[in-house]
Amino acid sequence: MFDWLSIVQICIIGIIVYVFYVNFIKNTSSEKLVRGLVGLGALWALSFILSWWHLTLLGRFLHWVALFLSMGLIVIFQPELRKFLALMGNIKGLKNVIFAFRQSEKNLSAKQKSIDEIVKAVSYMSEKHTGALIAFLEETDDGVIERYGTRLDAIISSELLLTLFFNKTPLHDGAVIIADNRIVYAGAILPLSQNQLQWKYGTRHRAALGMSELSQATILVVSEETGDISFAEKGSIKKYDDLKKVRNKLEKLLIKK
């Protein structure tokens, strides 16, 4: 039976596994193999369940298969284990692991806050029919943008976004460029799509589509005429009626779920 002490121990194990994954597995050639760990854990669980159901022979078979595969993990993850043990062998390395974990949590918190600010601004602009064009780039130098406009390099905030797209400011007709969780440029000019669009799409939508056709960027558009919120990517545009769906889309873009 689980008690509070068991729950605490499970949480500690979970944190250790998460730190190990973020610092030594993520974005490496071994990342794809991590998915196999889920299947291996399920195999272990199934072997115990079968034994509990008195299917002893089948349970033991799966148990030995899982044991054999588990031993193989030592060979598969040998480089990562060596790196982990080397770091754990000195205090400085241990501090680096703890610092990396804290930095990862800090970055995640900052991105969540940015998403809150963008949703807040987009919701207001949609309600007030304020036109907006926001391009999310992996790298600012995409080689596609016709003119970058004014460099800001500012923290993302709803107040700044609303100010930039206020129709009395000189930058409101251009696009805001967001990269690395910062507002990098404002008043940027994006390439217009040459494809035939429906009558309801204006210049902002044409610019969003043009950018998405020539790059890997994802572009958020708020229609000045209808207040509709849309995302353009990979040469197509999709309308989002629900702010919850807008938030989910932004989380995929900024947090890379």
Image (cartoon, grey):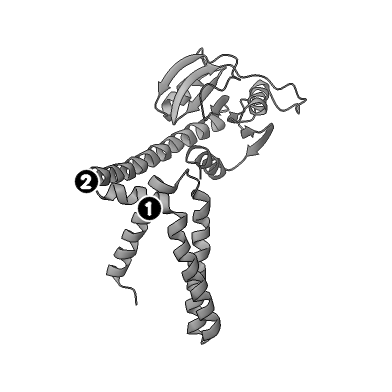
Q: Nearer the viewer, mark 2 or mark 1?
A: 1
x, y percentage for residue 35? Answer: 52, 56
Image: 221 above or below 79: above
Do residues under tags 2 and 1 come within 8 Å of each other at their CB atoms? no
The residue tagged 2 is 91
x, y percentage for residue 192? Answer: 68, 20
Residue at x 52%, y 80% (from the top left corner):
59
Residue type beneath disc 2: Ile
Please, what secondary structure does the residue beneath circle 1 have? helix
Tally of marks: 2
x, y percentage for residue 131? Answer: 58, 24
The residue tagged 1 is 81
Instruction: Judge left or right: residue 179 versus residue 145.
Output: left
Whether residue 21 is visible, yes or no, is no
Residue at x 41%, y 49% (from the top left corner):
79
Residue type beneath disc 1: Leu
Whether residue 93 is visible, yes or no, is yes
Quarter of image, res 200:
top right
Image: 181 above or below 43: above
What's the distance in space between the residues labelled 2 and 1, CA to CA?
17 Å
Please, what secondary structure does the residue beneath circle 2 have? helix
Residue at x 56%, y 44% (from the top left corner):
245
